[in-house]
Image (tube, coloured by chain):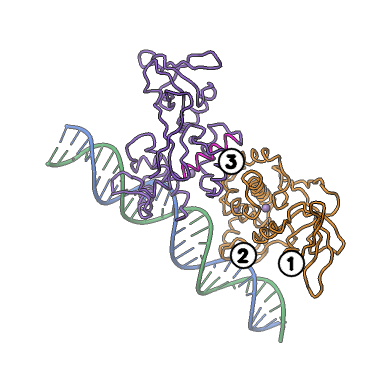
Chain colours: A purple, B orange, C green, D blue
Amino acid sequence: MKSQLSSSTEDYVKTIYAFTEWQDAPITSSQLAARLGVANSSVSEMVRKLKDLGLVDHRPYGAVRLTEEGRRVALTMVRRHRLLETFLVNELGYSWDEVHVEAELLEHAVSDLFVERLAAKLGDPSRDPHGDPIPTAEGAVPRIDAHRLSELDPGHAGRITRISDENPDLLRYLAQERIFLDTDVTVVRRKPFGGPLVVRIDEGGGSRDFDVADEVADAVWVRSGPAHPGCTLEPGT
Amino acid sequence: MKSQLSSSTEDYVKTIYAFTEWQDAPITSSQLAARLGVANSSVSEMVRKLKDLGLVDHRPYGAVRLTEEGRRVALTMVRRHRLLETFLVNELGYSWDEVHVEAELLEHAVSDLFVERLAAKLGDPSRDPHGDPIPTAEGAVPRIDAHRLSELDPGHAGRITRISDENPDLLRYLAQERIFLDTDVTVVRRKPFGGPLVVRIDEGGGSRDFDVADEVADAVWVRSGPAHPGCTLEPGT
DNA sequence: CATAAGTTTTCGGTATGCCTAAATACTACG
DNA sequence: CGTAGTATTTAGGCATACCGAAAACTTATG
Ligand SMILES: [Mn+2]
Ligand SMILES: [Mn+2]
Ligand SMILES: [Mn+2]
Ligand SMILES: [Mn+2]
């Protein structure tokens, strides 16, 4: 059952999974190549290998989709990655913009024992420093019910539950502006002529207004409703 | 200054260093091959590469010796390995026979930042779970003044300061027999006709006698003198 | 519906790091 | 001091994972 995949294989599978985590369409070869920073030809070769391993479904010139087994492997890697990020922030004092690169390598080096011991030590967290859900060891993914800040109408209030970790510079900027996970925000209005979104931020009893650039509004996810939402689990397949 | 060596390169350098850590003679090609579990021919190729990188001195058919630069790299890897082992035991509840394999992989995946943050969190320890000295970030090696149990005369008393981590089975056996680092022992006598060494073990107010097989007596290092010896540092070169 | 534009795959090649088998160099002994 | 035996290096190959360029296929457009 433990087939000992190479780190490249693990990264391919993880990247295929990540693409459909917050949207629906399956990933294409060139998108995969772009995300992995390799040539299209390299993807063609690896996808054939992944298919031979039974990790993806793929017809020539078609999109790449994970099989059940591929999804299982992906969730294992995502769990590792996010637990490691949590460890780096909670225990080693990393900031949330520094953790991704480190976790990207460590995830391939740790054993299953290490991961489970670490999870226990961290108190079995259900989300990582960016608010991304941490799959359980059994492959269940905590459901996070949130919308992009960019999609919300004026007047909508909620709590930041996820910030895309794709751009470290953006994360650094937000930290500097004292905007974190669990910060409460209200959409005030959109400035005219394609201007930025204005949000009100609750902070230490008072509040302040903040202009949100479009790229930022796309990266920040907000959940309305109760202050500390319980996480519901959807079973792994 | 950071030249990004491959994990194989790092393991070669570390193994060359380790060979002379507790004895004098430099390592030969075949010894290196045996320790790394690779063919002699692989060593010949890699040693040429290491020489090109300026990490070792080597003439054809001669022994392999680290250069100053090689020693610096080796000490970096040894520091990583031993800090990771310490972390696994102290923070994740590993036993001392489980840590080596895990650290062997992790040492190549962690960053300098990770290592220094980890060292700080662990309180800058000067020895690992097996009593092996942890080099400082500057490359100074805590000097451990100890002798093999097998070399001591009857009547000699001391404290266990190091146990070779080469054989996990031996470590497991010793743990089961409640013999740890910092256990106080006195050599009682050697049983005749090449029989085992008998040592007295101080334990919880009382004491017990224990028969030590030759392989064990070679693996256990004892330091006489004060109960908690201060560590002296020898500067890295 | 034909062809241009874009995407994907195939092809030939590079770099690591490993292997076995063969050649070569040391060393120790008669 | 020559030679047998051992240690080491060289030669030829394999597997992985990457590349750029060329060929093959899909799709979009006029
Ligand atoms: Mn990775
Ligand atoms: Mn994350
Ligand atoms: Mn290693
Ligand atoms: Mn150790």
Q: Position of residue A23 (x, y in %)?
A: 35, 34
Q: Amino acid at mark 1?
A: Ala
Q: Chain of mark 2?
A: B
Q: Secondary structure under badge 3?
A: helix
Q: Which residues are magenta?
A: A76-90
Above or below B179: residue D9:
below
Query: Foreground: B230 or B48?
Result: B230
Q: Chain of mark 3?
A: A
Q: Which residue is mark 3?
A: A121
Quadrant assignment, res A28: top left
Left or right: C18 in relation to A69: right
Quadrant assignment, res D10: bottom right
Mark 2–mark 1 Cα distance, whole angstroms, equals: 25 Å
Looking at the rendered structure, whether the residues under marks 3 and 2 are on a common chain is answered as no
Instruction: Count neighbours of disc 1 (C-alpha within 10 A) and say few if under 14, some if 14 to 19, many if 20 or more.
Output: few
What secondary structure prevails in the magenta region? helix
Q: Secondary structure under badge 2?
A: helix
Q: Which residue is mark 1?
A: B213
Q: Which residue is mark 2?
A: B34
Instruction: Count neighbours of disc 3 (C-alpha within 10 A) and say few if under 14, some if 14 to 19, many if 20 or more.
Output: some
Is residue B52 visible in the rendered image? The answer is no
Q: Chain of mark 1?
A: B
Above or below D30: residue B66:
below
Badges 3 and 2: C-beta atoms under 8 Å apart? Answer: no
Quadrant assignment, res A205: top right
